[in-house]
Image (cartoon, rainbow, N blue to C red):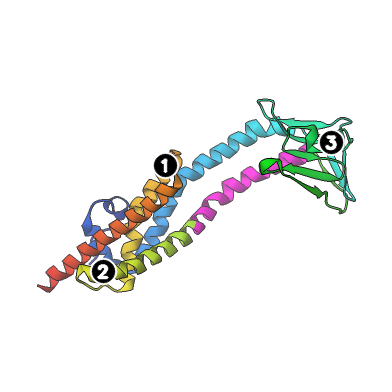
Amino acid sequence: MRRFSILHPLWMAFYDGAIYEDVARHWRNRTFLYLLLLLALVWIPFTIQTQNEVDEWVGREAPFYIDQFPDLSLSNGELSSSSSAPTLLRDREGTVLAVIDPTGQYTSLDDTEAPVLVTRTQIFIRGEGDQVDVSSLPDGPPETLTREDLYVIADWTRSLVNTLLFPVLLVLSYAYRTLQSMLYAWVASFFTSSAGGNLPYRTLLNLALIAITPAVVLDTVHMLMESPLPDWFWWPACVLLSLGYLRFGIRVTLESERRAAD
């Protein structure tokens, strides 16, 4: 009979072998529901943080940049502007981010330090090592972009983030963590025999789904705190941590089976 609820691994997975023993004996498919709960909980703070950042940008920063834009029209591959002079888009420090100039005053990026230049018929993008990519503007039906359109796009982006960010993160991370746990269970099958026992793959998978809890929680804290630890160190550390907890869970389970057999 199951001893612990679906909530208990959230903290017991860090220190208590009893949860691993209970999972191995009684949980069956509940580990997949637990993984969904775990990921939903850890994505909540990140989602709120990201939504707040997007709301702040749309409310404060977007108008600063949008109000610099003239009305633009593109027809048959040629750009026209409501401004009779070149438009220099700047950030709050005054750095020029892009130049929009259908007038012909700017003809190449040699005329400006901006990384992007849009002329009447071409767009120039400065890459690494001062390499410049040049492409023609699309030749299509007439289109117009106004400031009102940009405000609509900004509001649409905010609504999209508020609506879809959480479910998209949850679905993608659930698929990733499930595949990761399946791989960990396969790896664990090799060192299970060396521990003096034999566990079916399904049991190893259930244990792996619990064993990744510390790494998932710590990875969320690491992400929210913007820890300076480099990825080349952090990701291998999370893998080793998960495999370490998985080995711990396997050992506890095997010892429990031996006691039951005596």
Q: Distance between the Cα atoms at labels 2 and 3? A: 68 Å
Q: Is residue 24 above or below residue 219?
A: below
**Residue at (32%, 59%) from the top-left corner?**
243
The three-letter amino acid code for the residue at tag 2 is Thr
**Residue at (35%, 54%) from the top-left corner?**
213
The stretch of residues the image draws in magenta is: 147-172
Name the quarter where the N terminus is drawn. bottom left
Q: Residues within 10 Å of mark 2 (few under 14, many from 20)?
A: some
In what element is the residue under mark 2? helix
Q: Residue 166 vs residue 7: left or right?
A: right
**Number of numbered markers:** 3
Q: Which label is found at residue 101?
A: 3
In magenta stretch: residue 140? no
Q: Earlier in the sequence, mark 1 or mark 2?
A: 2
Residue placed farthest to the top in the image?
A: 93
The three-letter amino acid code for the residue at tag 3 is Asp
Q: Which label is found at residue 192?
A: 2
In what element is the residue under mark 3? loop
The three-letter amino acid code for the residue at tag 1 is Leu
Q: Residues within 10 Å of mark 3 (few under 14, many from 20)?
A: many
**Residue at (41%, 43%) from the top-left corner?**
222
Q: Which label is found at residue 229?
A: 1
In what element is the residue under mark 1? loop
